[in-house]
Image (tube, coloured by chain):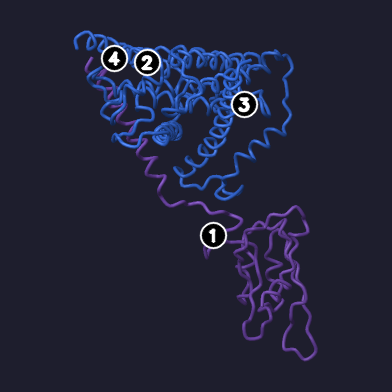
Amino acid sequence: MSRDMIMDIVRLVLYVACLVGFAAFNAAYLSLLERKLPSWMQLRRGPTEVGPWGLLQPVADGLKLLSKQILIPQGADVLLFRLAPVMVAVPGILCLVTIPFSETIAARNFNLGLLMIFSFGAINVFAVMLGGWASNNKYSSIAAARVVAQNIAYEIPLLLVVISLVMSMHTFNLHTIVDQQAGGFWHWNILALKVSPMMPIAFLIYFTCMLAETNRAPFDMVEAESELVAGAFTEYSGMGFGLFFIAEYVNIIVGSCVGTILFLGGWDSPFGFLPGLHWFLLKMYALSFAVIWVRWSFPRTQFYGLLNLSWKILIPLALVNLVLTAIMLKLF
Amino acid sequence: MITYIKEIVCGVYTLFVGMWITFIHMFRRRVTLNYPRQSLKMTPRYRGHIDLKRDEATGQPKCIVCMACQRACPSGCIKLDGAKAEGAPRKALTSYTLDFTTCSLCGLCVESCNFDALKFSKEYNLASMNKDDYRMDLLKRVLEKK
């Protein structure tokens, strides 16, 4: 084995370890933020007891989940029931592999990175559906049916928006996409009015679809506590439930990363100086903050409202955007 | 077509208004307290369990053992006893127990007292796993309070 190959393997293992750590850390502290932010919005204090300002709360939550028994309900499909939490958590972490955090920090620079992220994103839906179905519980089964309908409906506008971007950027490579947006915020795709005058709207469509794809409120029809107990996660206990939870936050991170790269110029500085990792993280966490902010501002939509929004508003708008982009590209 | 676009624009606008409201609320003053460490002072008209009043001049309870409160109590949760010491002008309390497990806080005892010797306390942290904690010796409380 040559020295290069060994170095490559070492590099790979290190990257995987770092990414799993990054994902777990983010999942833990986004879950704390998810409790702190709404408590501030509702003039409460949120967790304050574990550690200073409640900073160790995620550790306590994790220990609690780890110490619980994983119960498997009678009549459940044991294999699928156990497989679903793994299948839901792994794709999210795998997606992080392609994401370039800065000019130099990226685990792998794929030419088809964008495509890979969206294909792994689809596995996540499949896993939630399997988990819900394997639980042998009527609430979980309803949630499983819902997650499929919802994600089919929202994958279309999401991909239509992304296609219009890819048409103008001529690449699936995330690194190149960011490079093409360099040089100040007026070059970012969100303000690329020369490509399509609807780009800010396209960003809103992307953000809405991202909420729906990650099953976040106001589109959390899968969990829907008030109607379905905990939806697809009803029968899960201990770390099985914990993995679903981690996956949710990792998906938010992945969605925010992709949003940052596609629309907000990645690690590019808005004013043209000092580009780097800090800008990427700032934008990415701002988007994640917005995801949590939206959750605690709006009530859950009805299922018909959810589908109406997609089929009657988002898909037509995304199609118009796609056609406009094609026309603009042909003309200029 | 125009109503369709109008609806979308109006809808998006109202969403942003909603998000602005939650955003400014994040910077407002918190209204909750860290309860076991901080707590609110009870309002003057709060009616907790009853307490004996003390005569500040002598340091003894104002009660003259007329038994009016014991008679007035519909649940029979007040038991008091008094004795006249040698040479004393009137009876003095020797025991005053309140069985708070059956008290309904009606306040008839306070109303019936003609000598301004009873009041409502402001105690509200009374949770306990032990029934005996609610058989209160009010005489001891008033003498210990010094």
Marks 4 and 1 share the same chain = no
Front in this rendered view, residue A155 or A148: A155
Counting residues from the N terminus, which is met first, the one under dot 4 or under dot 2? 2
In the rendered image of the structure, the colour used to display chain A is blue
Specify the quadrant of the image occupied by residue B134.
bottom right
Residue type pointed to by label 4: Asn
Disc 3 target residue: A243
Specify the quadrant of the image occupied by residue A47.
top right
Indicate the secondary structure of the residue bearing disc 2. Answer: helix
Circles 3 and 1: CB atoms closer than 8 Å: no
Q: How far apart are the two marked residues, 3 and 4, measured between alpha carbons? A: 37 Å
Indicate the secondary structure of the residue bearing disc 1. Answer: loop
Image mark for residue A162: 2
Horizontal arrangement in the rendering, residue A75 relative to residue A202 (left or right): right
Circles 4 and 2: CB atoms closer than 8 Å: no
Q: How far apart are the two marked residues, 4 and 1, measured between alpha carbons? A: 57 Å
Residue lying at 69% horizontally and 79% vertically, measured from the top left:
B64
In the rendered image of the structure, the colour used to display chain B is purple
* Chain of the residue that carries numbered disc 3 in the rendered image: A
Residue type pointed to by label 1: Leu
Residue type pointed to by label 2: Val
Image mark for residue A62: none
Disc 4 target residue: A321
* A183 over A327 or under it: above or below: below
Q: Quadrant of the C terminus of chain A?
A: top left
Q: How far apart are the two marked residues, 4 and 2, measured between alpha carbons? A: 10 Å
* A210 over B56 or under it: above or below: above
One can see residue B91 in this view: yes
